[in-house]
Amino acid sequence: IVFLCTHSLDLKAIDGVCRRLRMQGFVVGAIDWWKAVGEAARGQTDAAVPFGHCGEVITSVLLALAPDAVDLASATEESPL
């Protein structure tokens, strides 16, 4: 079982679930999406702050997966939250 964690505040809960499942004999692991994507995107963007809510990195992923869900006309040059 692999858990894909896309919100850093959930990592502690996922770690607890993984530990419990391992004790029950399951083979489990967790991937921190932000860490994996952050490493892959490092140096690949010109944005001052490419990470964070609605930053260039997550917007690029959403454009690849569901382009109709992104309104680029509303995009601004503000730093992500």
Image (cartoon, rainbow, N blue to C red):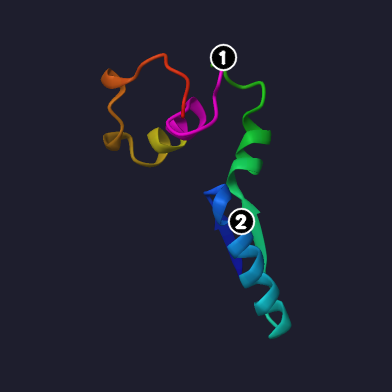
> Is residue 54 placed above or below 2 in the rendered structure?
above
Using a 10 Å C-alpha cutoff, classify the residue at mark 2 as few (fewer than 14 neighbours), some (14 to 19) or many (20 or more).
Answer: some
Identify the image quadrant of the N terminus. Answer: bottom right
| Secondary structure category for the residue under label 1 | loop
Left or right side of 67 for 18? right
Left or right of 1 on screen, residue 60: left
What residue would you read off at disc 1? 46
Residue 50 image point, x, y percent: 54, 24
User: Which numbered disc, 2 or 1, marks the residue closer to the eye?
Assistant: 2
Q: Name the residue located 65 percent from the left edge and 78 percent from the top edge.
A: 21
Q: Which residue is mark 2?
A: 11
Magenta stretch: includes residue 2: no
* SS assignment for the magenta stretch, majority: loop
- Decide: is 68 above or below 43: below
Query: Residue 33: x percent and y percent?
Result: 58, 46
Magenta stretch contains residue 51: yes
The residue sitting at 68% across, 85% down in the picture is 24
Q: Amino acid at mark 2?
A: Leu
Q: Are marks 2 and 1 in contact (CB under 8 Å)?
A: no
Q: Secondary structure at mark 2?
A: helix
| Residue 47 x %, y % | 54, 16
Q: State the residue lying farthest toward the bottom.
A: 24
The residue at the point 47 percent across, 20 percent down is: 79
Q: Residues within 10 Å of mark 1 (few under 14, many from 20)?
A: few
| Residue stretch in magenta | 48-60
Side of 10 where 66 appears, left or right: left
